[in-house]
Image (cartoon, rainbow, N blue to C red):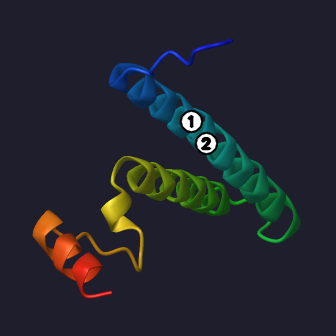
Amino acid sequence: MSTAKPTSSEDIVGQKYDRCLADFLVKTGIGFSAGVVASVILFRRRTWPIALSTGFGAGAAYADCNRSFNPARIPGTRVISPTEAAITASSK
């Protein structure tokens, strides 16, 4: 019989930070590489497509990380108080 050891809140926050950092590196890298390709193929080796697409990747990673740490920022999510939840539950 295996008993599950409860996960501490520090471990949960550490895992979220690790996921955010990995997501940031991947999305920024993909944005950078897409910018390099666009710069070489479409824009005659200008640097602004690289900076723009890298920024888009970093911004997307930041938004995902923000949603991970603050679920109330997810569109369509509503935070209700415990009394409001009790009223809603009793009316059903």
User: Residue 70: x, y in percent?
Assistant: 33, 54
Q: Give the amino acid type for the residue marked by disc 2 in the picture.
A: Asp
- Residue on which disc 1 sits: 19
| Of residues 65 and 55, the one drawn nearer to the viewer in this rendering | 65
Q: Residue at x 60, y 55 (%)?
A: 57
Q: In terms of secondary structure, where does tag 2 sit? A: helix
Whether the residues at callouts 2 and 1 have beta carbons within 8 Å, the answer is yes
- What is the quadrant of residue 13 in the picture? top left
Against 88, is 60 above or below?
above
On-image quarter of the C terminus: bottom left
- Residue on which disc 2 sits: 23
Drawn side of residue 78 relative to residue 80, left or right? right
User: Residue 43: x, y in percent?
Assistant: 77, 69
Q: Residue at x 52, y 39 (%)?
A: 20
Drawn side of residue 45 relative to residue 86, left or right? right
| Of residues 79 and 90, the one drawn nearer to the viewer in this rendering | 90
- What is the quadrant of residue 2 in the picture? top right
Against 91, is 53 above or below?
above
Q: Residue at x 57, y 42 (%)?
A: 24
Against 9, is 27 above or below?
below
Q: Give the amino acid type for the residue marked by disc 1 in the picture.
A: Arg
Q: Residue furthest left?
A: 83
Q: In terms of secondary structure, where does tag 1 sit? A: helix
Spatial CA distance of label 2 from label 1 is: 6 Å
Drawn side of residue 33 relative to residue 61, left or right? right
User: Residue 41: x, y in percent?
Assistant: 88, 65
